[in-house]
Amino acid sequence: MSLSFIDKVQWEAGVLLELAVFVLAIRRKLFQRHPLFTIYLGLLIFDEVVASIISTAFGMRSYVVFYTLWALQCFLILLRGAAVYELCGVLLAPFAGVWKIGRSFLLLIAGVLGVTAYFAASRSGPRISAIISTGERGVELAIIGILLFGLAFCRYYQIQIERYILWIALGFGFYSSVQIVNNTFLGQFLLSYFPLWNRLGVFSFNISTVLWGFALWKPLPVPKFAVAALEPGAYEALAPRMTSGLRSLNARLLELWK
Amino acid sequence: MTLLVFTALGGVIFVSLIWLLFAPNWSGPRAAVDSLEIEQLEPLHCRHFPQISMLLRLDDQAFVEQRAPASLARMWRQERRRILLKYLSGLTEDFARLEHLARLIASLSPEVSRKREWEWFRLGLQFRLMLRLLNVRIVLGSLSLPQFARLTDFVASQAADLESRMVQLAGVLPSRLRVNPSA
């Protein structure tokens, strides 16, 4: 089985983009702030090299190629999830109190969606393509779930998102959204949809890589290590009074409604 | 069916992502985190309570209905309804300022109570929902004036309390701010 011209162009463009973004990441010293994301970008190139070597050596239809590539894909998806969690940490960790509640919430979301993905995949039938598509869709849902809730925390607490993080997040989110729909179609139409599934997957990933390149195009802003913080007792002194005020106001509004 | 559900889900997720990333965050006056300019967040609309309470006087209503021609009385009622609606939207704005302050305090605190934050979130939703419903009732004319007067009375007392708390905060908190290098 050989690749069509369009697939070949897409694949080669993808490799070049990944290489360019990785070089940019190294130049911008991204590993100092996003070590997992930098490792992920590096592993993408490693994955392409391995795929190229083993498919030349064993042929595209070999079991060795199939299992090696899917094992690498699994690892890359999990690493992408970890990179998304890391991104949320970069945004929220300077706000110690918010990060304490945000962290456990994000892990809970990841856990629930991950377990759901596992059960959905294990029940999706004997066909390997159905298991893979359902499992991958579930993991993508978990990844985007972490990202959306992390961003929701930022919005709720009015935490400013730096420009480069905004584009990185958009890259992660765009690919996951497309893959959720793409994998659903694969689960329905199975092998007849496989070529289009592959093409769409590569195309959307290339767009995400462009967005990451856009994020890293300019030098990263100086990190804000220090955040002005209140004394530990201030929250406990102020928050209960504000909450009780709002609680009584709501009670009065409810009374009015009856 | 699965196809439809997950395609819609993918679309909703992507739109939510765009909104979370690009929609403007806070439209009201922004208190600087570094200097904690709390006075910018003081409630403004609650202060107009005396004028609103005059508007709600029942003897005025009786007087207009007895003495003024029907068309003028109708115009007077419409105008009063418009003012009440504006006042309610002002209260919503005041509430948003209070909410902004509460979140600012939480984001600057090293320890935040999960229970309290959840309660604040829930109460905020409840408050917004009830204000919307009240808006509908005012538009439909099904809210009696004494009921509204009781509400504004309560809001005014809350606002006075909040205002004194704001002044207290503005005076005390900036001096208690410190840079936390470990954060």
Image (cartoon, coloured by chain):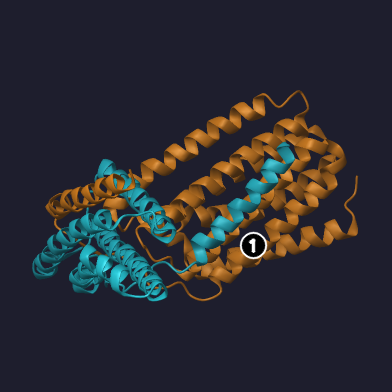
Chain colours: A orange, B cyan
Residue A163, image x and y in percent? 48, 70
Residue B28 vs residue B10, the one in the foreground: B28
Which residue is more in the foreground, A250 or A83?
A250
Residue A244, placed above or below residue A223: above
The N terminus of chain A lies in quadrant: top right
Crowding around mark 1 (Cα neighbors within 10 Å: few <14, some 14 to 19, many 20+) is many
Residue A18 appears in the rendering: no
Under circle 1, the secondary element is: helix
Image spot of residue A200 (x, y percent): 76, 53
Identify which residue is drawn at 56% across, 74% down.
Answer: A217
The subunit carrying tag 1 is A
Q: What residue is shown at x 56% (from left), y 31% (from top)?
A: A116
> Which residue sits at x=24%, y=48%?
A252
| Residue drawn at x 32%, y 44% as measured from the top left | B118
Rendered image quadrant of residue B55 = bottom left
- Tell me if A42 is positioned left or right of A95 in this view: right
* Residue marked by disc 1: A209
What's the amino acid at mark 1?
Answer: Thr
